[in-house]
Image (cartoon, rainbow, N blue to C red):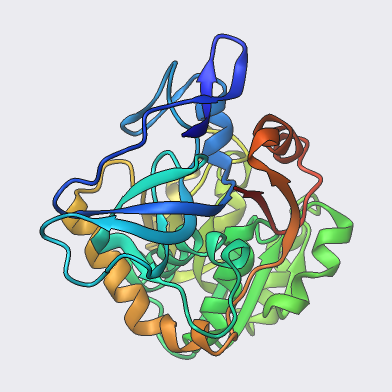
């Protein structure tokens, strides 16, 4: 099969062995695969959890048709349309743990649209509802809201009953579009007064829950914007791995600062997260109430160009490979 893999010359599409599903896995004939920020690190030769290094097939999620199932799989059969987070998704075939895969809704959802959903769904439902303990009527702020995951996060927050949804972006054009995806207040973190705007929007209380994809230089401002007993869930570090941290402010507001990643979770933990997300969100996904915009599609043969497009950070929504 053809696959986009890490080589000494960067990411190139080469021949690779067709994977064989383990007893708990499904084999997907990939029709589309979506790009994520972590793919840039893998493409550069770095490790992401258990994957990485020369010969690694890039990709974290895909959608297509089930071609074969392992002996222990009961919820899928050959011919089913499926989408899943799956290592090595940038290929003609990929295997996925059946417990983290979803059947594609029969509502005319395309493979391209389906490929955009698995990572965003499991990441943001877990950040908001699992780790973040979002309650009906609470306020939410998504740092880095113009990313694909961020756009879905705002929609999930709205669907789960948030009273006010706020999002940040330092790009003027992208920030202007956040309202299309459930955002009540769009903020620019280059403005040093943005925490004051959060407090104003929440009647002086501060925001109950922050899902932070930026980290780095916004850590202290997050705490300034947070309510007493607020929660900050650290999902990503697009703004840097390190930064100043005001420990006294953290203690003064009694903030829960929670780190999350899928890299150190067991298969059982991931399956539980996927099951919880499906229970809360699948009716809305099938009804088309939760969706993501596709910025641009590329053929698999142009995987390196697609990654370059993501690295340029000029996109809004998801970048998709069509296989």
- Quick check: 189 left or right of 57? right
Q: Which residue lies furthest to the left in this view?
A: 72
Compared with 149, 39 (above or below) is: above
Residue 11 in view here: yes
Compared with 170, 288 (above or below) is: below
Of residues 294 and 247, the one drawn nearer to the viewer in this rendering: 294
Q: Which residue lies furthest to the top in this view?
A: 8
Residue 127's spot in the image, x, y percent?
41, 63
Identify the residue shown where x is 76% and y is 64%: 187
Compared with 176, 240 (above or below) is: above
Residue 131's spot in the image, x, y percent?
33, 64
Identify the residue shown where x is 55% and y is 85%: 107
Residue 123 in view here: no
- Quick check: 89 left or right of 311? left
Q: Quadrant of residue 174?
A: bottom right
Identify the residue shown where x is 62% and y is 78%: 165
Of residues 122 and 193, the one drawn nearer to the viewer in this rendering: 122
- Quick check: 144 left or right of 69? right
Compared with 98, 156 (above or below) is: below
Of residues 68 and 23, the one drawn nearer to the viewer in this rendering: 68
Q: Quadrant of residue 8?
A: top right
Identify the residue shown where x is 68% and y is 30%: 304
Residue 322's spot in the image, x, y percent?
64, 50
Residue 104's spot in the image, x, y percent?
46, 73
- Quick check: 183 left or right of 2? right
């Amino acid at each position: 099969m053809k696959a986009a893999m890490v080589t000494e010359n960067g990411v190139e599409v080469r021949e690779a062995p067709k994977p064989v599903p383990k007893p708990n896995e499904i084999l997907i004939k990939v029709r589309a695969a979506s790009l994520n920020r972590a793919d840039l690190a893998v493409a550069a030769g770095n490790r992401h959890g258990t994957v990485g290094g020369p010969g690694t097939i890039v990709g974290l999620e895909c959608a297509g048709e089930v071609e074969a199932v392992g002996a222990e799989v009961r919820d899928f059969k050959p011919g089913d349309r499926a989408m899943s987070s799956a290592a090595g998704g940038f290929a003609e075939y990929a295997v996925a743990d059946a417990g983290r895969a979803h059947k594609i809704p029969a509502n005319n959802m395309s493979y391209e649209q389906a490929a955009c959903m698995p990572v965003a769904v499991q990441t943001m439902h877990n950040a908001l509802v699992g780790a973040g303990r979002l309650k009906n009527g609470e306020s939410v702020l998504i740092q880095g809201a113009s990313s694909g995951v961020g756009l879905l996060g705002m929609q999930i927050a709205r669907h789960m009953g948030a009273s006010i949804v706020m999002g940040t972006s330092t790009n003027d054009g992208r920030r202007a579009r956040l309202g299309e995806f459930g955002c009540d207040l769009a903020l620019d973190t280059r403005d040093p007064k943005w925490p004051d705007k959060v407090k104003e929007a929440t009647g002086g209380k501060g925001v109950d829950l922050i899902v932070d994809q930026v980290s780095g230089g916004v850590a202290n401002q997050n705490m300034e914007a947070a309510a007493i007993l607020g929660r900050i869930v650290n999902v990503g570090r697009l703004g840097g791995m390190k930064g100043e941290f005001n420990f006294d402010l953290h203690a003064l507001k009694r903030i829960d600062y929670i780190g999350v990643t899928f890299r150190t979770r067991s298969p059982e933990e991931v399956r539980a997260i996927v099951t919880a997300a499906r229970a809360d969100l699948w009716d809305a996904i099938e009804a088309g109430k939760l969706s993501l915009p596709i910025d641009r599609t590329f053929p698999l043969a142009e995987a390196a160009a697609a990654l370059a497009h993501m690295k340029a950070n000029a996109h809004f929504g998801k970048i998709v490979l069509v296989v």
